[in-house]
Every structure is written in structure tokens, then in C-alpha cells.
Image: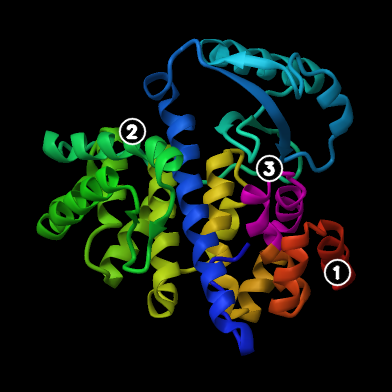
């Protein structure tokens, strides 16, 4: 659900505590998903197995989804080991290409639903998937020192431990501080480096030819001083040609927006509405996480833009079964439909997706 809402009325303290807990859990789960998506080879043993919990799709407007699902070489309930991930992704891509004559835009394996089962998201080349214009690949030689790269890698490795041993995160300062002490200490070290090296971080983010350098710079910049310059650099990085850089940039923006209404007004919604139509799952996921905060003001222009540019994509995302990945789209759709905020939160918590979708369609 929306991590940007506020508690109101006589139950404000109870609502506030529930809201804070849901926000911290959402951020930590997003980080854990990123660890598996980007670092599965190093973070887990190759023979570790997962049960496939859910196979979801996006970008399928105008396509026969049931036929595509039936043709897949793997199914919900199957067991798969990490060493077989690459082959499974290749087989899924081939299955989609055989069925459609066009390739899947992406196949993402993400850990995990509430049963600790694997989630698979398959991007399809339907009418609700659009090619986006990304920044040209930079060619500069600016580099961060090895020390901050090591801190970033350590933070990503510790995130998995944190979700298992001591989940929870404080984002009230505009950057994440884990309840898990080893990760929190690493994050504080990143914060210290970011404060002292903002100019270098922004230069690397804008100009480095190495994607890993830009990715670490995007993450570190989120730990820097809050300013319009910081926000502008992260918005520019949200159009980076590398999906991992975009992911870290938009995630940093979402945490910043969540921490301060003032900062959230510095972030334009338009680029992220377009990102909802991306063929890349991480783009859609993080754009939704940011927009659910930006739309809490219910700016009519923002909501009209999202209706006109990304309604089909939001409906696809709202129909995903995992609430941690679907609730942002459900909240955004409910706001587009004009459902009152407290009532909307109740509908989302109850999982009544069709009520929201019917309301938004009735408002066309």
C-alpha cells in the first residue's frame, strides 16, 4: 500500500505505527528482491532451490495471455535451482518467441513471496509495452575509489541477512538505515562518504563509461545532502541506458520523496509515468514505488497524465498476486478513480482489485 499516506482521526497513533511498519517492510523487501535479481550468483549457493510461487506477466495488452502461459516450459509449483536460472530464462524467452514471433522484453526472477517462493515476471511485447528513449552511454573516465565500491557490495550482501535476521528500515532522513546493525553501520559509512564527495559522485553518475560505477554513484547520491541538484542528478540517471543504474536512481528518489513532502515536490512525475510502460520489470516496479508517493497529493494533472499514458500498464501491475509488488499500482489506480484515501487503503488491504479497476474504468 501507499507508504506516503498519513494517519488521521481518533486512531491516528495506531494507523501511524501500521503505516511506518508497512513502509519499512516494503523498502527492505525491495532491496532483497534487488539482491536476488542482480546478485543471485554471488549471494546464494548455486544448488539452492526455490519453489516457483507465481508467474506473472506485463506488457500483454492485445495478446492472448492464456495461450502464452500454457506454452511456458516451467509452471507454478515447479522447483528450480539457482544454477538453472539462466537456462530457464532462455527457455522462457524461446517459448514466447515461438508463440508470438517476437521475444519477451525481459524475464525476471525475484525473491520472494510470503511463502518464501520464487516470483517470475515476464515482459511481453504487447500494446502496453513501449520502447523508451534512454540517455546515450557515457564515455567519461571518472571513477569512484575502490573503498566505496566495496561498501556498496557489502551493503547489498548484508541486505539478504537483514531481511532474515532483523528486517526493518528507517527512511525518515531521506536515506535507508537498517535495523540490522552490520548493515546500518555500512549505510552510515556510505552516508559519510557521500557527504564528503558529492561533486565526484555526481560526475561519475553523469559521465562514467562503466555502468557499475554509475550504479554505485546513484546509490551513494541518495545518501547525500538533500538538494534540488541531488534530485536533478537522480532524475537524469533514471533514464540511464543501464537498468541497474535506473533501478538505484529511482529507488533513491522514492526514499527521498517518502521522507519529505517538500522534497517530493521537486520530483517530476512525467518521466516515471512513461517508465511504467517499460519492458523491464525493475523499471515498472520502482516507478510504481515512486509514483505512489508522488500521487498522494492527488494532483489532477498528474492523475490525468497517468490515466492517459499508463492505465493499461497499471491495471496489469495491479493484477499481480503478490501484494508487495501490486499494491503501489492499486493505490495509484484508486487515486485516478477518485476513491477516498482511507477507503482506498481498506480496499487495497483487503485485496479487492476488481473494485478498484472497475471504478477507474467507470471514470473514463
Residue 250 position in % (x across, y down): 44, 54
Query: Marks 2 and 1: in contact by CB < 8 Å?
Result: no
Secondary element at image label 3: loop
> Where are the magenta residues, as a range?
309-330
Work out how far the residue at label 1 is from the one at label 3, CA to CA, in angstroms: 23 Å
3 or 2: tag closer to the N-terminus: 3
Answer yes or no: is residue 241 visible.
Answer: no
Q: How is the image coloured?
A: rainbow
Work out how far the residue at label 3 is from the one at label 2, CA to CA, in angstroms: 32 Å
1 or 2: tag closer to the N-terminus: 2
Q: Is residue 264 left or right of residue 14?
A: left
The mark closer to the camera, 3 or 2, is 2
Query: Marks 2 and 3: in contact by CB < 8 Å?
Result: no
Q: Label 3: which residue?
A: 129
Indicate the quadrant where residue 131 lies.
top right
Indicate the quadrant where residue 66 lies.
top right
Q: Residue at x 28, y 64 (%)?
A: 230
Secondary element at image label 2: helix
Which secondary structure is most common in the magenta stretch? helix
Q: Is residue 36 left or right of residue 156?
A: right
Q: Residue at x 78, y 72 (%)?
A: 337
Mark sitting on residue 359: 1
Secondary element at image label 1: helix
The mark closer to the camera, 1 or 2, is 2
Residues packed near mark 2 inside 10 Å, few (<14), some (14 to 19) or many (20 plus): some
Q: Label 2: which residue?
A: 157
Amino acid at each position: 500500500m501507499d507508504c506516503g499516506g498519513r494517519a488521521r482521526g481518533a486512531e491516528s497513533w495506531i494507523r501511524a505505527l501500521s503505516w511506518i511498519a508497512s513502509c519499512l517492510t516494503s523498502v527492505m523487501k525491495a532491496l532483497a528482491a534487488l539482491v536476488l535479481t542482480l546478485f543471485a550468483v554471488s549471494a546464494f549457493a548455486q544448488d539452492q532451490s526455490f519453489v516457483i510461487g507465481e508467474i506473472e506477466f506485463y506488457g500483454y495488452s492485445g495478446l492472448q495471455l492464456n495461450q502464452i502461459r500454457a506454452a511456458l516450459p516451467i509452471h507454478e509449483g515447479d522447483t528450480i535451482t539457482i544454477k538453472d536460472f539462466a537456462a530457464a530464462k532462455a527457455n522462457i524467452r524461446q517459448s514466447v518467441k515461438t508463440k508470438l514471433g517476437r521475444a519477451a522484453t525481459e524475464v525476471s526472477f525475484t525473491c520472494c513471496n510470503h511463502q518464501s517462493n520464487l516470483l517470475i515476471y515476464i515482459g511481453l511485447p504487447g500494446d502496453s509495452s513501449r520502447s523508451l528513449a534512454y540517455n546515450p552511454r557515457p564515455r567519461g573516465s571518472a571513477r569512484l575509489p575502490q573503498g566505496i565500491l566495496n561498501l556498496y557490495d557489502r551493503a547489498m550482501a548484508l541486505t539478504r541477512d537483514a531481511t532474515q535476521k532483523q528486517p526493518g528500515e528507517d527512511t525518515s532522513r531521506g536515506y535507508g538505515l537498517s535495523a540490522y546493525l552490520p548493515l546500518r553501520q555500512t549505510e552510515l559509512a556510505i552516508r559519510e562518504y557521500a557527504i564528503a564527495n558529492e561533486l565526484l559522485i555526481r560526475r561519475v553518475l553523469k559521465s562514467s563509461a562503466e555502468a557499475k560505477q554509475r550504479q554505485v554513484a546513484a546509490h551513494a547520491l541518495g545518501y547525500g545532502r538533500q538538494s534540488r541538484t541531488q534530485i536533478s542528478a537522480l532524475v537524469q540517471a533514471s533514464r540511464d541506458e543501464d537498468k541497474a543504474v535506473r533501478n538505484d536512481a529511482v529507488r533513491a528518489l522514492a526514499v527521498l520523496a517518502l521522507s519529505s513532502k517538500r522534497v517530493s515536490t521537486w520530483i517530476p512525475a512525467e518521466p516515471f509515468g512513461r517508465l511504467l510502460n517499460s519492458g523491464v520489470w525493475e523499471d515498472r516496479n520502482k516507478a510504481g514505488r515512486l509514483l505512489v508517493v508522488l500521487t498522494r497529493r492527488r494532483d489532477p494533472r498528474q492523475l490525468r497524465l497517468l490515466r492517459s499514458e499508463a492505465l493499461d500498464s497499471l491495471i496489469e501491475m495491479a493484477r499481480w498476486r503478490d501484494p508487495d509488488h501490486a499494491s503501489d499500482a492499486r493505490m495509484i489506480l484508486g487515486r485516478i478513480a477518485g476513491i477516498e484515501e482511507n477507503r482506498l487503503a481498506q480496499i487495497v488491504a483487503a485485496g479487492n482489485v476488481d473494485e478498484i479497476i472497475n471504478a477507474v474504468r467507470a471514470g473514463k
